[in-house]
Image (cartoon, rainbow, N blue to C red):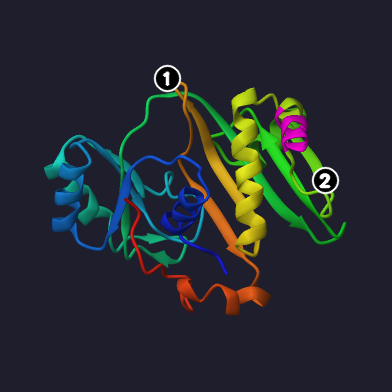
């Protein structure tokens, strides 16, 4: 079961991973109020369970609350790769210094989880892997060991990530294990101008076999609470 971005961010926050302040809505008028609460200037992001939202026009920067309402009105109802946008996430903009890619995914063939990481985040990882495969680190995780601080440091070094990402790598593994996930992805994970590591976007796929333990998301993966 795939979660929406705002739900993935909610899980990250619950596990101590920093995310920008954000709220989700299905109302353009409420989008204006959310933007006002968040400081005026916001990023408006379509909430659909597919990639390529930016290229499809589903991610836009709004300069003020009025623009946020207009932008939300434009994005709500859009069709993005066969998915109709029913809600938008409004998030505070971030002063980005560097962007990274990190994920844990179940490698069914190997019967283990695979860590995939790159210092070239912000774009589709498939594009990076195709054009510069040496820029993408792939490291298998021993299920009995998991991702310790030492393992996280190994992943960060292999991918060229800064040492301060180690704690986030450990916490992302905790998300995967404790939330019954088979995929946890952050793209981009960013280093801000203020020296913080934040998850700007996230994708989480839960194991369908563990659905009975994840009832809070509902049949369609719809969260019962908002991100604040």
The number of numbered badges drawn on the structure is 2
As for residue 154 lying within the magenta part, the answer is yes
Answer with the quarter of the image where residue 126 lies: top right
Q: From what the image shows, is residue 144 above or below residue 116?
A: below
The answer for how far apart the CA atoms under marks 1 and 2 are is 32 Å
Residue located at (42% from left, 70% from top): 222
Residue 27 image offset from top left, x and y in percent: 20, 61
Q: Nearer the viewer, residue 202 or 67?
A: 202
Mark identifier at residue 140:
2
Residue located at (66% from left, 42% from top): 170
Magenta part of the protein: which range? 149-156
| SS category of the residue bearing label 1 | loop
Q: Are marks 1 and 2 in contact (CB under 8 Å)?
A: no
Mark positioned earlier in the residue sequence (1 or 2):
2
Q: Nearer the viewer, residue 207 or 46?
A: 207
Q: Please state if 65 lies on the left or on the right of 161 as rendered.
A: left
As for residue 218 lying within the magenta part, the answer is no
Residue found farthest to the right: 110
Residue 23 image offset from top left, x and y in percent: 30, 52
Residue located at (77% from left, 31% from top): 154
Q: Main secondary structure of the magenta part?
A: helix
Residue 16 image offset from top left, x and y in percent: 50, 44
> Badge 2, how many Cα within 10 Å: few under 14, some, many 20+?
some
Residue 138 image offset from top left, x and y in percent: 78, 39
| SS category of the residue bearing label 2 | strand
Query: Label 1 belongs to which residue?
Result: 193
Quarter of the image that includes the N terminus? bottom right
Residue located at (66% from left, 34% from top): 128
Q: Nearer the viewer, residue 74 or 4?
A: 4
Q: Please state if 108 lies on the left or on the right of 197 as rendered.
A: right
Mark identifier at residue 145:
none
Q: From what the image shows, is residue 130 above or below residue 23?
A: above
């Amino acid at each position: 079961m795939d979660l929406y971005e705002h739900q993935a961010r909610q899980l990250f926050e619950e596990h101590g991973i920093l995310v920008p302040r954000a709220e989700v809505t299905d109302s353009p008028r409420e989008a204006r109020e959310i933007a006002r609460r968040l400081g005026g200037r916001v990023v408006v992001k379509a909430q659909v369970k597919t990639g390529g939202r930016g290229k499809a026009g589903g991610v836009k920067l709004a300069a003020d609350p009025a623009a946020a309402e207009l932008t939300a009105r434009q994005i709500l109802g859009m069709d993005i790769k066969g998915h109709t946008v029913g809600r938008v996430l409004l998030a505070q903009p971030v002063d980005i210094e560097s962007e990274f890619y990190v994920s844990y995914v179940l490698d069914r063939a190997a019967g283990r989880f695979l860590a995939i990481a790159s210092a070239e985040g912000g774009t589709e990882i498939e594009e990076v892997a195709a054009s510069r495969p040496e820029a993408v680190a792939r490291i298998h995780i021993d299920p009995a060991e998991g991702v310790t601080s030492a393992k996280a440091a190994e992943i960060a070094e292999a991918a060229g990530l800064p040492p301060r990402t180690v704690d986030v790598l450990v916490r992302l593994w905790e998300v995967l294990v404790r939330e019954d996930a088979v995929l946890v992805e952050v793209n981009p994970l960013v280093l801000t101008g203020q020296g913080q590591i934040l998850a700007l976007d996230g994708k989480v796929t839960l194991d369908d076999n563990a659905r009975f333990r994840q009832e809070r998301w509902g049949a369609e993966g719809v969260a019962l609470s908002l991100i604040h």
